[in-house]
Image: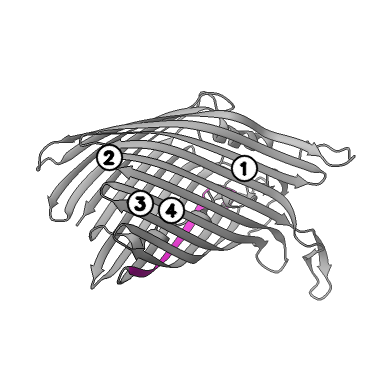
């Protein structure tokens, strides 16, 4: 999912509808995973840590929410990751040499809502900064910033509630490369669309790529509740326009993108029964212009000059559909879900058209048992979940030629990374997880909870067959 379009989806419209209690919470989380079943960009082994705090309070009717988080990630043998989010754009600058990577993130934000009779007005603001680096030549360092501001209004009736918000989103990211060991030549790759590329030997760190996205968001929440029946629908819309260029004087332009995303979730709850339907659709358009490097007579420096307007070269569409049923009892809870995903990508390098598509269906289930060990010992729960992903149809790389041209696509693509990424996204996979939770009330609002989870996934066919990935996580929360 596009990171700019998915950032902080929930709070922008849902916080003015918040009707829960005041609380303050601190948390510490750690996640470890490793194995050969991984995406082309993922580390072979990774450790993620997170420290955070958040609180909700009400002062004279004014509801306030704030949070702060610090995250640190470490990974080994990461490849091809030129952007922090490689799926935010079809244009990327990267290298093929595996190396250890680190990432630091800082997130903070706040929301407020003030009641005016049955109405509430509010605003949500979020900020996140991140630093990503690879520690082996070629060494890339990425600095990223995300910010969003969204005012909103909500209506709170006896049975009917509604919330509406609209806001502005922006992110920027810069990547620069450097080489420490000069005993061998290293190559930088410019990636376009479906792993089409050009490459050149690295010369200096003076040339940096800069990416900027600006966008708008809109959220609409509708809710009806009476007795034990609740019907709720949340709709989200996001639009962004992004541009990439090389910093400095040479005027090199890599490409622009337009992205539009819709998402909707419908919930029906009656007592302990819950029915859920959700869907999302994301469409991305990539555009490039014709440029040529020439000597600028005014400065005697070689610069890039543009000889055409932007033209479409990339089209991508991702869709998800999901349905689930869940039952929450006093001691037992269970759920069953079915998810369908589809992806379509096309990239034109005239006269060649490169296409890729796949559709998968994934049944999921979960079962949870709760144990009450008494007031002093707290409550334990065990949850078991499983999933199986089955491909319906897939084509990794279909190539067609326009007109009566005779040409070949040989050498135009990095086919090995293309096939690895496609296998990870579309191959049949079975997986499961075990969650252990313990919570202990300490009086008043004070409570402590500990969650431990173990996950395992195995690829059953395709290029990644016989590979697996196993992980574990530990989270500690203290509420007061």
Task: Report the magenta residues as a range.
Answer: 119-139
Between discs 1 and 2, the one toward the N terminus: 1
Instruction: Check if mark 3's residue and mark 4's residue have beta carbons within 8 Å.
Output: no
Question: Label 1 to label 3, Cα distance in Å?
Answer: 29 Å
| Residue picked out by circle 3 | 50
Residue that appears at 58% across and 57% down: 175
Quadrant, the C terminus: bottom left
Instruction: Tell me the tag on residue 272.
Output: 2
Residue 338 x, y percent position in the rendering: 45, 34
Residue 470 x, y percent position in the rendering: 41, 32
Question: Label 3 to label 4, Cα distance in Å?
Answer: 28 Å
Between discs 1 and 3, the one toward the N terminus: 3
Question: Label 1 to label 2, Cα distance in Å?
Answer: 51 Å
Question: Label 4 to label 1, Cα distance in Å?
Answer: 41 Å
Question: Label 2 to label 4, Cα distance in Å?
Answer: 21 Å
| Residue picked out by circle 1 | 96
């Amino acid at each position: 999912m596009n990171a700019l379009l998915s950032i902080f989806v929930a709070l922008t419209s849902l916080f003015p509808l918040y009707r829960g209690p005041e609380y303050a919470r601190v948390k510490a989380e750690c996640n470890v995973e490793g194995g050969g079943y991984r995406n082309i960009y993922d580390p072979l082994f990774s450790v993620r840590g997170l420290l955070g705090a958040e609180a909700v309070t009400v002062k004279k009717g004014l509801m306030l929410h704030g949070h702060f988080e610090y995250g640190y990630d470490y990974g080994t043998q990461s490849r091809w990751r030129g952007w922090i989010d490689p799926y935010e754009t079809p244009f990327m600058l990267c290298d093929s040499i595996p190396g250890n990577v680190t990432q630091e993130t800082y997130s903070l934000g706040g929301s407020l809502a003030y009641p005016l009779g049955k109405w509430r007005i509010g605003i949500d603001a979020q900020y996140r900064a991140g630093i990503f680096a690879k520690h082996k030549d070629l060494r890339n360092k990425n600095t990223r910033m995300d910010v969003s501001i969204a005012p909103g209004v909500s209506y709170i009736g006896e049975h009917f509630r509604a919330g509406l918000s609209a806001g502005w989103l922006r992110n920027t990211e810069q990547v620069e490369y450097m080489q420490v060991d000069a005993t061998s030549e290293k190559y930088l790759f410019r990636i376009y669309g479906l792993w089409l590329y050009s490459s050149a030997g690295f010369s200096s760190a003076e040339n940096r790529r800069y990416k900027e996205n600006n966008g708008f968001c809109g959220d609409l929440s509708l809710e009806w509740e009476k007795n034990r029946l609740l019907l709720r629908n949340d709709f989200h819309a996001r639009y962004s326009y992004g541009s990439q260029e090389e910093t400095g004087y040479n005027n090199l332009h890599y490409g622009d993108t337009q992205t539009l995303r819709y998402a909707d979730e419908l919930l029906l709850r009656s007592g302990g029964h819950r029915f859920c339907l959700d869907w999302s659709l994301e469409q991305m358009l990539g555009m490039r212009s014709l440029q040529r490097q020439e000597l600028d007579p005014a400065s005697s420096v070689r610069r890039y000059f543009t000889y055409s307007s932007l033209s479409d070269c990339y089209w991508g569409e991702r869709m998800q559909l999901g349905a689930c049923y869940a039952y929450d009892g006093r001691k037992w809870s269970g759920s069953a879900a079915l998810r369908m995903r589809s992806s379509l990508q096309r990239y034109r390098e005239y006269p060649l058209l490169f296409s890729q598509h796949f559709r998968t269906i994934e049944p999921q289930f979960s079962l949870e048992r709760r144990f009450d060990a008494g007031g002093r010992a707290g409550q334990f729960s065990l949850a078991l979940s499983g999933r199986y992903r089955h491909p319906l149809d897939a084509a990794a790389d279909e190539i067609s030629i326009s007109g009566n041209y005779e040409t070949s696509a040989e050498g135009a693509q990095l086919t090995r990374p293309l096939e690895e990424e496609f296998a990870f996204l579309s191959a049949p996979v079975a997986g499961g997880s075990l969650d252990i939770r313990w919570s202990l009330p300490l009086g008043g609002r004070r409570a402590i909870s500990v969650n431990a989870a173990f996950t395992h996934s195995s690829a059953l066919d395709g290029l990644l067959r016989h590979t697996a990935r196993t992980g574990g996580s530990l989270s500690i929360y203290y509420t007061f």
